[in-house]
Amino acid sequence: MTAYDSLMAFQRETEALGQIAGRLGWDQETMMPRGAAHQRGEEMAALQSVLHARRTDARIGDWLTTIDRAALDPVATAQLREITRSFQRNTKVPTKLAAEIARVTSKSQGEWAEARSNEDFKAFVPTLERVVALRQEEGQALADGGDPYDALLQDYEPGTTAAELDEMFGALRPRLTALRSAIFEKPAPKAVDGAFDEAAQLALSQRLALDFGYDMNTGRIDKAVHPFSSGSGQDVRITTRTNIADPFNCFYSTIHEVGHAAYEQGVSGAYALTPIGQGASMGVHESQSRIYENQLGRSRAFTGYLFGKMRDAFGDFGIDDEDSFYAAVNRIHAGYIRTEADEVQYNLHVLLRFDLERQLIAGDLQVADLEDAWNSRFEADFGYAVDKPSNGCLQDVHWSVGLFGYFATYTLGNVYAGCLYESLRDAVPSLDADLAQGNTSNATAWLRDNLQQHGGLRTPRDTIAHATGTSPSEGPLLAYLDAKFGALYQL
Ligand code: ZN
């Protein structure tokens, strides 16, 4: 066996163990008996310590120095790029620091949940200060004298920098705030009204998952409090939820997660259980969920199809025609919560978090001042004041568990989705006619052929550039939003 073969055989087992850890996580959110929580914690910790030992195994370093890189094909080169990144990431952080981060963040989530339910940000300040300090230390260890926040970003979107994102996000913010202000001066369209049977919602959401090409032979759908997708290759599961008054929550959560799952199911089988056998990054992943959910799922054409299906399932729900239904699906509404935000306001939520977390990691903003900073930024961008911490800086779990650098990938995903949609429209002239019949097969085939099948073969930016033929920018997303909501609200 060559050094490359030995390394890949070792890596394959690590990837398989990683998939098992993911499936335990899925089980915890869906099936696990409540009384099993403590034991599950020990099981996960044991598996994580095996994984950490494998990811920092000194033999990886030896193999990486022995391999003759000049002789490798593009697939092997990409595998080494990913293995090298993971090995350096895991060996640069001192074991003691990694253990302390794991210890503190396993407790801090519970403390965040308690502070949130008590509407008491001050009670959470000491814990969050500790989490921020640990991530600052970790960022410094990873950065080798470079920028600690940039170093943290690499976990979610390899190759990107805060400066690059700042330029892109800086261009989005004034355009999005202007669009939201213009919309709020117009009358709000009618919303759907009534009680929507939850079993019927689940049945229709399964129909939609199949319409979008989700393969139930290598997948399954269960209920969870927060929808997610989990797994790669031949076992890619999704979850959804229901709300009796809001069927769109169920339908569009499902389509969103199908986008994530279709990406994993679409990766070439030749890459199974290897580092490139999964999505290229969080941002590219989110581009798939978003284009399925928004550009395709919330289009005029597809909502026409959905309207018919909803009338069949629920009878009269206060909306009489396809155009009014399209307006109801795409209704822009005031609100505080990122995960409930519409297409126009969603990215403003993310931009707020991106700016504040950079300041926290840089030490330019103290945790004790976070709530005030959040509230004043929110009022500036949204036009009304935050009423309580659970609607403000305590709404998301991310910071409590030390996820700094993650939020940006949500907006990057929307930006990438804008770029992909522009190319997709050119490539599939029958798109609207297809979607009006509930037929996504030409659209999803284009995404699979041009993006999904390649998994992590290319870096995130190159993955988008390969699919679209041009390097990603915010322009297409803004043009799409202006055109769609300009027409809907007669701006
Ligand atoms: Zn997502």
Image: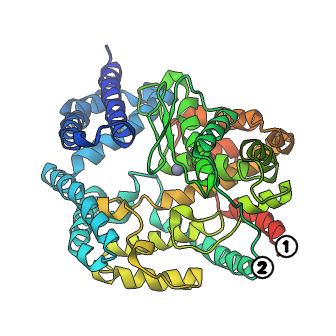
What residue would you read off at disc 1? 490
Element carrying mark 2: loop
What residue would you read off at disc 2? 186
**Image side of residue 122 versus residue 264, left or right:** left
First in sequence, mark 1 or 2: give its number. 2
User: Residue 356 sits in which quadrant?
Assistant: bottom left
Q: Is mark 1 within 8 Å of ligand 1?
A: no
> Relative to residue 98, is residue 394 depicted above or below?
below
Residue at left offset 76%, top offset 34% = 442
Callout 2 crowding tier (Cα within 10 Å): few <14, some 14–19, many ≥20: few
- Residue in the foreground of this view, choosing between 277 and 213: 213
Asked if marks 1 and 2 touch (Cβ < 8 Å), the reply is yes
Spatial distance from mark 1 to mark 2, Cα to Cα? 8 Å
Give coordinates of residue 272: x percent, y percent: 46, 25
Which amino acid is tagged 1?
A: Gln
Between label 1 and label 2, give the one nearer the viewer: 2
